[in-house]
Image (cartoon, helix red, strand yellow):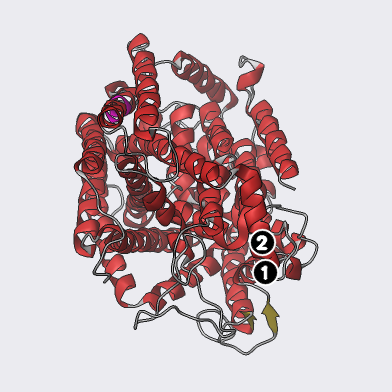
Amino acid sequence: MSPTPVTDLTAVDYAVMALYFAAVLGVGWILRRVMRTSTDFFLSGRSLPAWITGIAFISANLGAQEVIGMGASGAKYGIATSHFYWVGAIPAMVFVGLFMMPFYYGSRARSVPEYLRLRFDEKTRTLNAVSFAFMTIFSSGVSMYAMGKLFNLLLGWSFDVSIMVSAVIVLSYVLLGGLTSAIYNEVLQFFLIVFGFIPLVWLGLSSIGGWEGLTARLAEISSARGLAPDAYTSAWSNLGSASQNPVGVEWFGLVMGLGFVLSFGYWCTDFLVVQRAMAADSMTAARRTPLIAALPKMLFPFLVILPGMIAVAFTGTNAGAGQGLVPAKLTAAGAPLLDAAGHVVLDYDLATPMMLVHLFPSGMLGLGLTALLASFMSGMAGNVTAFNTVWTYDIYQSHIRRGASDAHYLTMGRIATVGGILLSVAAAYLASAFNNIMDLLQLVFAFVNAPLFATFALGMFWRRTTGHGAFTGLLSGTVAAAIHHGLTLPAGASPGVKGGFLGLAHTYPSELAQTFWTAIIAWSTCFVVTIVVSMATRPRPADELRGLVYSLTPRPADEGLSWIQRPWVLGVVVLALTAALNFVFY
Amino acid sequence: MSGSTALDVRWPIGGLFTALGLLLAGYGLGTPGNQGQYTSVNINLWWGLIMLLFGLLVLLGAWRSRRNLHGGLSAASVEGRATEGREHRLGLEHEE
């Protein structure tokens, strides 16, 4: 690909990376002796304290999409990107901790699909398990592909070598130490990412005159694009109508689509994150897991979004046809890519990486790039550990081989780990060969995911919900999402993967706006269809649903805990702090 | 039930950050002019020292509570047992 790398590393940078690799492999090596049962391997023997599972809860999600993607969105949309945290993730994390964890943990299900089996039936579980298994493989493949491409561009490393090295390291430590090893390394990776990015933000801000300087510079840029001067630096004040803000969405679509449907759908039902809480050593620890995770999570916008905003605002550098430190996307011939209106298309995914290589001297550069590597690896390990569990318990044990010994399933878990990594590598190469196939797959996953929260909410809080209702609701939600997507387009896009393949009924100002409304429609369809079909089918008797449905489950008692340890108190504190952040950046 | 007794996660975290801190601080000390073009602070030295301090504090925590399961949070085991007991009484827990 690119013949001249952006920067070179020195011995000290490689030494930083080597120390990190030694640490993650060492953790796997020490833990190898204690993986005796499948519960040890898949659920860490349900033995971890809340602070560890809490950090792993955010770290498993802190993959490439988060670190690179949030920096890219920061560069593209400004501080409004923080809605992914302050409207989206945090309220959903409080909800899953307070209201849903009692059913996940209390039912003793070993996975989210298994909860669906207990609450509904085998077909609902299998639908969820199969789509989830595919999704984990492909997201791990996409992030491997992104990593290989990035390190090739920045450092001139070979794409194949980057992929193989990271795959072998993740494989080794997951194979040796199972979920415990993945979780321990996620905690380690979390601290590495925090320590790698704090100095980046500090250096970036101090070199452009602090928050004041950033605001002034971004005001120039947004005025030049015909938006209000504070369009990039205030999160809410321009959300009155879709045309006034860079996101291209108004407050209702944002709060319902992103906040309610997409974020609750992800944080409350995705086994990748829920698995971390299920590894906790008690019900209280499981409930506290997402709440503890929410505390650092609400500060993450400063760590991952700000670098992107600073990159755009950076002056005094020569990024060619780009803006600040963000380079232009290049055509195959090497010329800057122009959109339909003749503006240069920026390669926003490079915003954060460019900050690292331009601001850090050698030494710190090694630390920053290691933090980036750590985020790729924790994301990959998160996907692989969720995949091997769902494959072994929800697909293999329930459809291929029932009633085998625990040792058999432990072996199968190890085989699934190898298989999962091999499939991820294959997906990474598929992505490098056919970029559109990956776009298409991610679109299908978005359709599958959007309605999920309606199914779980009804299943947990309305005892009349039936298995047939849940299954048909999920399917119709997915179909509705596909139809809506097929009939709409974001402004400036042509029909195809971006939508409009069934005709054109509506044009949205941006891709995000289209995504949010697709989610809202999928959720509503699933919600209504599930209710209608449930009313027409026979419900399960109440005593089969004990511990699975809100009204038939005793409330977890908090007596004996000091007030500060109670999940309710923690939840209220988290929400109050989040509201304060929204207010400060209004 | 064995995963917990094997290793306090604070040992590898403390160890890694202590080593990284020593490496970066040492490098910064040896190359005083190398801080990039955007700051006059010897960032390798100072950030290395901060990481070293963090690493040592984490190691200290692990060392002080080396007889507990996961260290420091002795509540993790005591409170964990109490909760398990409560769940058992409330029938929230299915026997395995």
- State which quadrant residue A572 falls in: top right
Q: Chain of mark 2?
A: A
From the viewer's perspective, tell me whether residue A134 is left or right of residue A488: left
Q: Is residue A310 visible?
A: yes
Q: Residue at x 66, y 44 (%)?
A: A91
Q: Residue at x 54, y 62 (%)?
A: A449
Q: Nearer the viewer, residue A60 or A209?
A: A209
Looking at the magenta stretch, what is its main secondary structure? helix
Q: Specify start and end residues of the magenta stretch as a single range.
A: B16-20
Q: Nearer the viewer, residue A195 or A421?
A: A195
Looking at the image, residue A395 lies above or below residue B93? below
* Residue B17 highlighted magenta (yes or no): yes
Q: Name the quarter where the N terminus of chain B is drawn.
A: top left
Numbered circle sitting on residue A220: 2
Residues at circles 1 and 2 in contact by the CB criterion of under 8 Å: yes
Q: Residue at x 54, y 52 (%)?
A: A310
Secondary element under disc 1, as helix, strand or loop, is helix
Q: Is residue A457 visible?
A: no
Instruction: Name the residue carrying label 1.
Output: A224
Q: Nearer the viewer, residue A300 or A199?
A: A199
From the viewer's perspective, tell me whether residue B92 is left or right of residue A583: left
Looking at the image, residue A346 lies above or below residue B41? below
**Which three-letter amino acid code belongs to the residue tagged 1?**
Ala
